[in-house]
Amino acid sequence: MVSRRECLRAAAAGGAGRACSGRGAGCASPERALRAPAGPAGWERLPDILRRIRPPVFPDRTFDIVRFGALGDGGRDCTAAIRQAVLACHAAGGGRVLVPAGRYLTGPVHLRSNVELHLADGATLAFSQDPAAYLPLVHTRWEGVELMHYSPLIYAFEQENIAVTGPGTLDGQADAAHWWPWNGRTQYGWQPGQPDQRAARTRLMELAEQGVPVAARRFGEGSYLRPQFIQPYRCRNVLIEGVRISNSPMWEIHPVLCRNVTVRSVSVVTHGPNNDGCDPESCTDVLIEDCLFDTGDDCIAIKSGRNADGRRLATPTENVVVRGCRMKDGHGGVTIGSEISGHVRWVFVERCTMDGPNLDRALRFKNNAMRGGVLEHIYMRNVQVGQVAEAVVHCDFTYEEGAAGSFRPVVRAVFVEGVTSQRSEYALFLRGIPGGVIEDVVIADCDFRNVARGNLLEHVRGLRLENVSINGRRADREVAA
């Protein structure tokens, strides 16, 4: 005999195989865009994913940046010395580039294959506040769109076996006078009449929709688009471990089109605009564990490209494991979207703690009819949620452009179990749109306390609740809306 729990698990895993209801006029079919692979479903896949994720190992060689001319007084520009140490380490076949105790001022650091950048206890890399230091332009991705732009603060392009490790600090030195005002909001130092990113952001999105080649999308100086902090791009075997990250211009850890990524025991404490903690984008086999996120935006945001550019590259993010992390402040604890036009699937979240007066949501989905991404096979279990400002599980297809697009948004095959929360406005906030129905969401063995407004459910099909309590009352039922 098959238990009801097993039936619910099968429903959550199997929903991706069915057509999504409510097809809107002119909407592209996500079933043609993405098919779920055959094989074991749900948590049974996790051991195989973890077996594939292995941090790189480096030769036992050390290249101390002080020997290349770096001075840890916080005043001398150490960019050239760090660059020489990285190149020497790479040329020797790999090893560790050591940043000893001290404060080292630097421009962008470009990693090469088989190089581990290690910050010793008491070491700080303080990144230049001068935008010109991040030239020449490099091939990067900004809010899900490829372009030629300022270098990220730590960058690697098409490299293998790279790492940033150690107990030291990475200080982006962004503040209300540097980088953050470019966001265009007064709370981050911008004043009326000052330049900001809005015109360049609009132009970048237009170029992508027009199919302009990436090499011709040239921004940088005068565009006021902020660079990311750590961005490995088209890399394999990446490790970010132990470091403390603060004062970032924009997104903190942003692997793009990478395979085999480990982010472990990292502390991200930064409250600037768009200061997401970790944003794997169009990546495969990613482990994020034992990290602290105290951020000005989403703690973790899983992405796969924006609109036409995401569909052009057509590379989903898949096989992402988040475990043992603490989310303190941020728009969402684990967010999927909004740059998800290349699709996201097989995400596993377990044994995390999410709590803070400025944490808005625990599990968040951001999709709309301009993105049209398929978000499926999302699993969360054994997560303790203290206080969140809005909802424990939040999905809103009216986000930004909402229904104003031709690509049907899809969220389906979501399974949440063993989650407790102590205070929220909603337990579940699930808002689909006509032609974009949220499908096959299973909530099991969950206890939601001090919920001010219950659930909000619009355009939802196949919502199943098993052994769920809201404000001490059982909420078991099946919902078709």
Image (tube, rainbow, N blue to C red):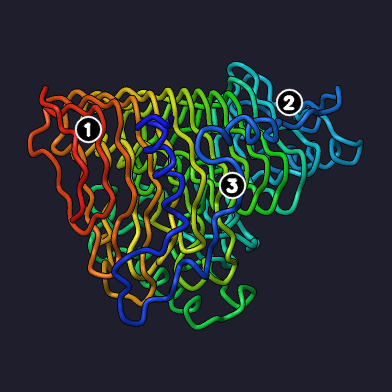
| SS type, badge 2 | strand
Q: Which mark is residue 255?
A: 3
Q: Is residue 206 left or right of residue 156?
A: left
Image vertical order of residue 254 relative to residue 97, above or below: below
Q: CA distance from mark 3 to mark 2?
A: 23 Å
Q: Is residue 208 left or right of residue 392?
A: right
Q: CA distance from mark 1 to mark 2?
A: 40 Å
Q: CA distance from mark 1 to mark 3?
A: 28 Å
Furthest residue toward top: 121
Question: Residue placed at 59% from the left, 67% from the top?
Answer: 313
Q: Hey, what amino acid is under mark 1?
A: Val
In front here: 475 or 211?
475
Please name the residue that numbered disc 2 is placed on. Answer: 98
Q: Which mark is residue 63?
A: none
Q: Position of residue 34 (x, y in %)?
A: 53, 63
Furthest residue toward right: 92
Give the crowd class for mark 2: few <14, some 14-19, many >=20 residues within 10 Å: many
Q: Hey, what amino acid is under mark 2?
A: Leu
